Amino acid sequence: MTAPSVTTAAHAPATSGADTHIKARPALPEGAVYQADGSVLVPLEYPVTQRRLVNGAEQSDTVSSVIMHRIKGRAMTSILDLEGNGSQTRAMIEASLQQTGPVADALLDELDAEDYLKLTTVASVFFGSGKKKTGRSTSQP
């Protein structure tokens, strides 16, 4: 059995001049992988079992992985308007999962801390480094 092929920046195929605007993707936590559409598949170390009643009968589903997406401006505004880092972090994860309310609560409330931190890390890669290179010094003479 051979290992799966991995493309790194050093081994990436040559791009045409039209593709030069594409940025290198930030590194992801172990096991997380970029999808073709730019979303990220994140396997959970500790899957979450969700139970619900359907027509009076209990059913359960096990969530063993999630898909996280880039965060849009409207969600970002809502996140920044929240008080406290915990609330902002949770809102960032919910926006990236594209889940809110009871659906998000059912998953995030039962998520293991290790997986919660992994989702935080993945959501944060969509923000970039936050540093801009302008070529100008910010210090005053």
Image: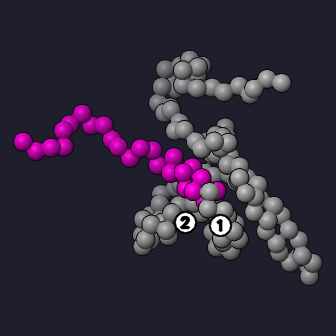
Q: Residue 27 placed where, x, y %? A: 54, 38
Quadrant location of the C terminus in the rendered image: top left
Q: Do the residues labelled 1 and 2 touch (CB within 8 Å)?
A: yes
Q: Which color scheme does this rendered protein use?
A: one colour
Q: What residue type is labelled 2?
A: Arg
- Left or right: where 63 falls relative to 109: right
Measuring 73% from the left and 57% from the top, which residue is drawn there? 46
Residues drawn in magenta: 115-141
- Residue 11 visible in this rendered orientation of the protein: yes
Observer-nearest of 16 and 48: 48
**Mark 1 packing: few (<14 Cα in 10 Å), some, or many (20+)?**
some
Observer-nearest of 52 and 117: 117
Residue 4 among those drawn in magenta: no
Q: Residue 135 placed where, x, y %? A: 24, 33
Determine which residue is flagged by label 1. 108
Measuring 47% from the left and 30% from the top, which residue is drawn there? 21
Quadrant location of the N terminus in the rendered image: top right
